[in-house]
Image (cartoon, rainbow, N blue to C red):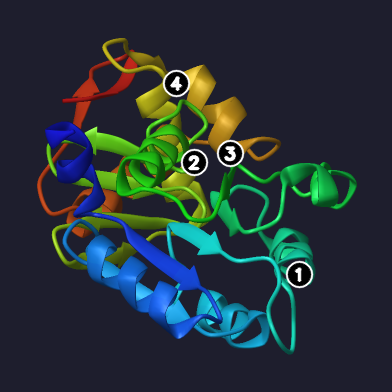
Amino acid sequence: MLELEKKLKNFTVLVIEDDEAVRERLKNVLSFYFKDVYEASDGDMGYRVFLSEKPNLIISDIVMEYENGIYLVKKIRQTNLSVPIIILSAYPKEEYLLKLINLKIDQYLLKPTTNQELFEAISNVLCSGDCAIIELSKNIFLDTDNNQILFDDVKIDLRKKEKDFLELLCRNRNRITKYYLIQDYVWTDKYMSQDALKTFVKELRKKLPVNIIENVKQEGYRLI
């Protein structure tokens, strides 16, 4: 639990719930663990908050006034396939199974839910191997959905190539990422000269709060 709490301090969460009492309870509980807790009382407002704040996790009700959770998730999945979504509902999963099956819902919890059940679900979706948040180094995280570095309360925007490069180094953690892999994964069909790569890494290092990239001469790069 302590390890989970440490990770959550770098994450933001959006709670979408039309019952004010339930929403306030969730917000109060989650605010002790997450860096920021955003809230919305219906699907329409929730979608607008999602677009503006780009949270790392969404916790949503299904049956809401103005715009229900199913329609909300459909809209989110049109632009973002990987942000984790936890559904909290008073209705059995079977009632919505056909509607949810193609929407990549990560967890479905029945109300009322205990704090333990909620945090088990949060742990499952944020600490799984498919999580969009990757730990690069101590207290430094890569948000692959939003092309950002998360460090304490700071968000550092990255270009796509920079995000792809850091993600590749992370996948090859404890190994040297060879030049040809960087060519194929980051530059794809464009030619990558050594000078271009050196300049690219130099500029990326300037963005990082600490240097976590090591150059292995004549071979490639790796995370420190």
Task: Work out which quarter of the rendered image holds the C terminus and state it.
Answer: top left
Q: Position of residue 82 (x, y in %)?
A: 60, 47
Above or below residue 89? Residue 172 is above
Which callout, 1 or 4, points at the residue further toward the start of the chain? 1
Q: CA distance from mark 2 to mark 1?
A: 25 Å
Left or right: where 176 falls relative to 140: right
Mark 1 lies on a secondary structure that is helix
Q: Nearer the viewer, mark 1 or mark 3?
A: 1
Task: Work out which quarter of the rendered image holds the N terminus and state it.
Answer: top left
The amino acid type found where label 3 is placed reads Trp
Q: Circle 2 is placed at which residue position?
A: 164
Residue 179 got which mark?
A: 4
Which residue is painted at 26% across and 56% down in the image?
A: 150
Q: Circle 1 is placed at which residue position?
A: 75
Structural crowding at the residue carrying mark 2, measured as other residues with C-alpha within 10 Å and reported as few (<14), some (14–19) or many (≥20): some
Q: CA distance from mark 1 to mark 4?
A: 39 Å
Q: Position of residue 106 (x, y in %)?
A: 60, 41
Which callout, 2 or 3, points at the residue further toward the start of the chain? 2
Q: CA distance from mark 1 to mark 3?
A: 31 Å
Above or below residue 32? Residue 63 is below
Q: Circle 3 is placed at which residue position?
A: 187
Structural crowding at the residue carrying mark 3, measured as other residues with C-alpha within 10 Å and reported as few (<14), some (14–19) or many (≥20): some
